[in-house]
Amino acid sequence: ATTDWMAFLGASYFRSSGELNQYGLSARGVAIDPALPTPEEFPRFTEFWLEPGAPDSKEYVIYALLDGPSVTGAFRMVCIKNQQIVMDIDANLYARQDIKRLGVAPLTSMFWYAENNRHQIRDWRPEIHDNDGLAMWTGAGERIWRPLNNPSSVMTNSFVDTNPRGFGLLQRDRAFYHYEDDGVFYDRRPSVWVEPVGEWHEGAIQLIEIPTDDEIHDNIVIYWLPKEPVKAGSEWHYAYRLHWVATEPYLSKAVARVIHTRLGNAGIPGQPRPKGGRKFVIDFEGGPLNEVEKLDKVQPVINTSKGRIDNEYALQIVGTKNWRAFFDLYVEGKEPVNLRLFLKLGDRTLTETWLYQYLPFSYE
């Protein structure tokens, strides 16, 4: 029997079930003015053409016209179906009006809760999310992992870059017992990696996180936002590749990756806990950590936008080659705190950069 593996869902939404054959997040042709005081605009694909291929070909070519009040466009999508699903996309956009936020290569996902926000759990399942983090590979070569949040109000974060090498929403946690859902299989949801083709110049990867209290609401949006203003009559041409995968394309061997982010009360187990502190525990695996010995003096490098860092250290997790970083944060007020951490050995960077936006909370 044959199984569908790609769907166009209305407006400019489309998605693939990826190599694990489970639908999850969606892509869009374009995003127009998301998360602004004015209503978001949703252009739609109005016409499609399919280019027939050879009987044994694994390439499918789709042409689509896009139309909306502020923008019109034409797309060519070459869909390649092997074990992984890859889409080569040429997007041609024409602005009819000035546009405040032109979101290029947008992805839309759902994040309710995971190991980093257990205090928000209102369900029997341990975790519920299509994706657990935003991964970025900057134009300068830095690898970044930003765990997702379910904030109490809409949060918009911009990560400024020039000619990014790639970015995407990933589902790094593939353990079934972390979800315990054999109906919708969150452990099988695809990761999507956006690989720019050619120069995208200056701009920012923008992440929008919207509050949700259920898994039925898509509340995560990412896209590329060009720095140049979008004026009426301007033309925009972008080429990129979408990878619908179970792992990560171009996984770095030069740095370890983040696999877990956990939060708890500050202090040292077995001793009286200080009040007002939050403990962060971040696990890393792979890359150069496979060569690091237990007694090597691996150090966490930590920066915070506010508050005080205390009790920071790193150790190798017993029985593995993985390393775990610990630190306590003491901060007053409820304003978001931006955190940054990586591990180093001497002058050598061992891991990708962990970014986190901590939204102060109290355990009930």
Image (cartoon, grey):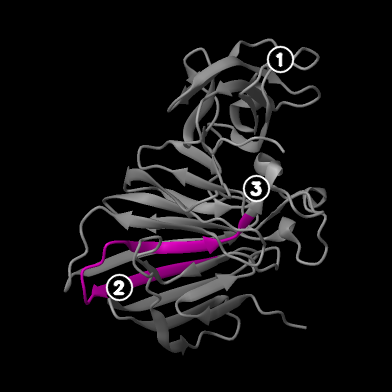
User: What range is drawn magenta here?
Assistant: 86-111
Q: For the residue labelled by badge 3, is the local secondary structure a helix, a strand or a loop?
A: loop
Asked whether the viewer can see residue 199, the reply is: no
Using the image, tell me which numbered label, if any, was put on residue 294: 1
Q: CA distance from mark 2 to mark 1?
A: 53 Å
As displayed, is residue 315 above or below residue 66?
A: above
Q: Which residue is mark 3?
A: 172
Within-10-Å neighbours for mark 2: few <14, some 14–19, many 20+: some
Marks 1 and 3, how far apart at CA: 25 Å
Q: Is the magenta region chiefly helix, strand or loop? A: strand
Residue 18 at least partly seen = yes
- Asked whether the residues under the numbered discs 1 and 3 touch, taking CB atoms below 8 Å apart as contact, a structural biologist would say no
Going 22% across and 77% down the picture, which residue do you hit? 96
Vertical relation: 340 (above or below) 137: above
Q: Is residue 298 left or right of residue 228?
A: right
Q: Which residue is at 76% across, 27% downward?
A: 320
What kind of element bears circle 1?
loop
Q: Is residue 22 left or right of residue 358?
A: right
Query: N-terminal of the two: label 2 or label 3?
Result: 2
Amino acid type of disc 3? Arg
Q: Residue at x 59, y 86 (%)?
A: 55
The residue pinned by badge 2 equals 92
User: Circle 3: is it few (<14), some (14-19), or many (20+) Cα within 10 Å?
Assistant: many
**Mark 1, residues whose alpha carbon is within 10 Å: few (<14), some, or many (≥20)?**
some
In the image, residue 230 lies in the stretch drawn in magenta: no
